[in-house]
Image (cartoon, grey):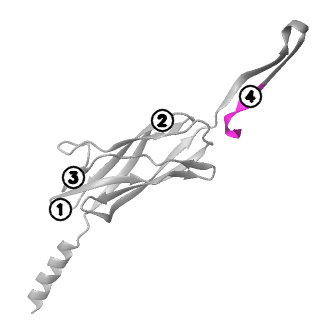
């Protein structure tokens, strides 16, 4: 009776086992950008489970948020398939997933945080792994911005020179 219980318990464990998947890092290059520019990201994933043959996963991200604003979430296309013991980007495993974050012109300076999530393709409600990541948006000022008003022919000319802080727009 005990042996039947153990066999049944092992069966239940294997059927409901969640793949052991780790998002080791989400690397942004560059990790610090100016408003109106883009950054590229790479998701480094490791599959350490030796109980399952392969896992098929898709990735999504939250919007990146800070105390000063929000940046739209990047779209991560495609399905990554890893076999037991593989790390993406290390042969014979496939390349690691990549994405682009578009930082709008006029985006407020600050440190923005997003959360990357890996989900099982066969059961999207099953979260396999999560990892937070950070993007810094720089404060941009433009020196020597000139504003000219008036009529130069009648000697009514006003020139104003002041730094422009794009964070104030």
Image: 83 above or below 153: below
- Say which element carries label 2: strand
Classify the position of the N terminus by image quarter: bottom left
For label 1, the residue is 50
Image: 116 above or below 137: below
Specify the label residue 163 is tagged with. Answer: 4
- At label 2, counting other C-alpha atoms closer than 10 Å, the crowd grade (few under 14, some 14-19, many 20 or more) is some
Q: Position of residue 164 (x, y in %)?
A: 72, 30
- In primary-sequence order, the first of circles 3 and 4 is 3
- Say which element carries label 4: strand
For label 2, the residue is 38
Give the extent of the magenta segment. 162-169
For label 3, the residue is 82
Residue 86 visible? The answer is no
Residue 88 visible? The answer is yes
Measure the C-alpha gap from mark 3 to mark 1.
Answer: 11 Å
Measure the C-alpha gap from mark 3 to mark 2.
Answer: 29 Å
Q: Is residue 168 magenta?
A: yes
Foreground mark, 3 or 2, reads 2
Outermost residue toward the right in this view: 155
Q: Nearer the viewer, residue 163 or 148?
A: 148
Q: Residue at x 38, y 53 (%)?
A: 60
Image: 18 above or below 33: below
Measure the C-alpha gap from mark 1 to mark 2.
Answer: 38 Å
- In primary-sequence order, the first of circles 4 and 2 is 2
């Amino acid at each position: 009776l005990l042996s039947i219980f153990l066999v049944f318990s092992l069966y239940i464990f294997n059927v409901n086992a969640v793949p052991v998947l780790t998002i080791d890092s989400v690397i942004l290059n560059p990790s610090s950008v100016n408003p109106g520019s883009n950054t590229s990201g790479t998701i480094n994933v490791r599959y350490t489970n030796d109980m399952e043959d392969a896992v098929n996963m898709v990735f999504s991200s939250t919007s990146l948020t800070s105390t000063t604003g929000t940046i739209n979430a990047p779209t991560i296309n495609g399905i990554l398939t890893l076999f037991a013991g593989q790390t993406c980007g290390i042969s014979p495993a496939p390349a690691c997933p990549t994405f682009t974050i578009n930082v709008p012109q006029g985006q407020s300076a600050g440190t923005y945080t997003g959360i990357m999530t890996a989900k099982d393709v066969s059961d999207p409600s099953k979260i396999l792994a999560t990892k937070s990541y950070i993007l810094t948006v720089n404060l941009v000022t433009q020196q020597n911005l000139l504003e000219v008003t008036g009529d130069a022919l009648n000697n009514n000319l006003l020139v104003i020179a002041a730094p422009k802080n794009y964070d104030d727009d």
